[in-house]
Amino acid sequence: MLNKIWLSFFIIAFVSALATWIGGDGLIFERLVDSLFKMTKVSVDIAIGLIGALCFWLGIMKIAEKAGMVDVLARGLSPLFTRLMPGVPANHPAFGSITMNLSANMLGLDNAATPLGIKAMHDLQTLNKTPDTATNAQILFLVLNTSSVTLFPIAVFVYRAQQGAASPTDVFLPILLATFASTMVGLLVTAWVQKLKLANMVVLAYLGSFCTLIVAIIVYFATLSAEQMSHQSAVISNLMIFSFILICLIWATIKKQTVYDHFIEGAKQGFELSISLIPYLLAMLCAIGVFRASGALDIVLDGLRYVVTLLGLDTLFVDAMPTALMKPLSGSGARAMMLETMNTYGADSFAGRLASTIQGSTETTFYVLAVYFGAVGIKHTRHAVGCGLAADFAGIITAILVCYWFFA
């Protein structure tokens, strides 16, 4: 999938540039080549700029992991999943893997979440009587992963900081609201298709608690002006994030963990990750750069802007839509689109903030499906794609609405 997307950027860019050249613009190919060289430099600048922030956050996350915070979250979520997956026997090993995976996702521990997710799929596969066809439990687990249940979208904050955002975490609450919407819609749609009974005291208690928290956030911010809302969002976000850091340190200390050594271990991984990102950033940003320089991206956005105008809606959100269109298909492609949007319009522009919120609100549906189902040899995905895309759509629409509320 990613190979076809990447190749199509260059082919479409060439066709678009050729049409522009025939139309009388003799400098179009010069702009294409200039864009390539510019994006090679931007790619390296971004990767180098990420080193410090990534090292710090991976250091903190390593402390959280070693202190057992993931285990505590997993135990807290276990009663919920025993009721959402009635086809899985009580005390089955799959529940441990599932809750560990989702807990790691909530804390932004992507490196830990993926192997735990694959293990969860393998555990669920032991109950699968038709090995090449996804079970209801496997589909629900995959949809919850694609809906991006993330409490701390650290990667988005890191990229915003590198791009010069005045307050990199000001999108924290918008992302929280958007990812909650994507998760709830993904869960409800899947439950409807699978005829799950959600009218259960335990399920209602969990979902009611989550909904109460979100409603409280909405009610509080509804009382504020736009300027107060933006300021309060930044203050609360930063308070929560620093509190999380302090909790990790204190928790690990109580558990008699060597916090400094664990931090250094995680920070080393951050340095390696920053350098390893360069080829991927280079590939996608160069492709997107020529796609924009050729005028092809403007044609797509202008077409979308025209349709939105016909519907009588505001078009301010359109500049961030490349990230939304790419998100279900490619994680690295969506990340590159987000970075390109911030690089073009500014990290603190409406488009830059919306692209960041979209990036943090959902996961890459087709990538997660390919990795998790491919790991256990599932070929027939049944309703997994439809439910996953429903969650994506809900997250994107909510991201747009919330960003208008907070930032427009």
Image (tube, helix red, strand yellow):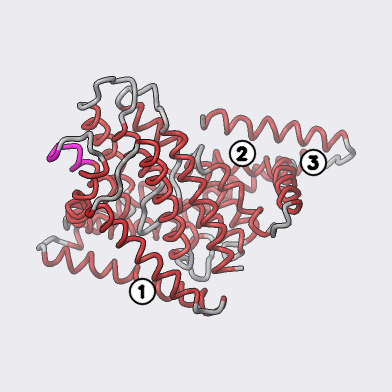
Give the image quarter of residue 150: bottom left
**Badges 1 and 3: C-beta atoms under 8 Å apart?**
no
The question of residue 93 being in magenta is answered with yes
Name which of mark 2 and mark 3 comes first in the sequence: 3
Q: Secondary structure at mark 2?
A: helix
Give the image quarter of residue 125: top left
What number is the disc on residue 287? 2
- Position of 80 relative to 246 (above/below): above
What's the amino acid at mark 3?
Ile
Instruction: Look at the image and give the residue range highlighted in magenta.
Output: 90-97
- Position of 382 relative to 66 (above/below): above
**Residue 12: where, in percent of width, then height?**
70, 33
Name which of mark 1 and mark 3 comes first in the sequence: 3
Which residue in the protein does label 3 denote? 28
**Residue 372: where, in percent of width, then height?**
34, 32
Residue at horizontal 35 percent and vertical 66 percent from the top: 213
Which residue in the protein does label 1 denote? 239
**Residue 24: where, in percent of width, then height?**
90, 39
**Residue 169 left/right relative to 127:** right
Q: CA distance from mark 2 to mark 1?
A: 38 Å
Along the viewing direction, whichever of 193 and 355 lies nearer the viewer: 193
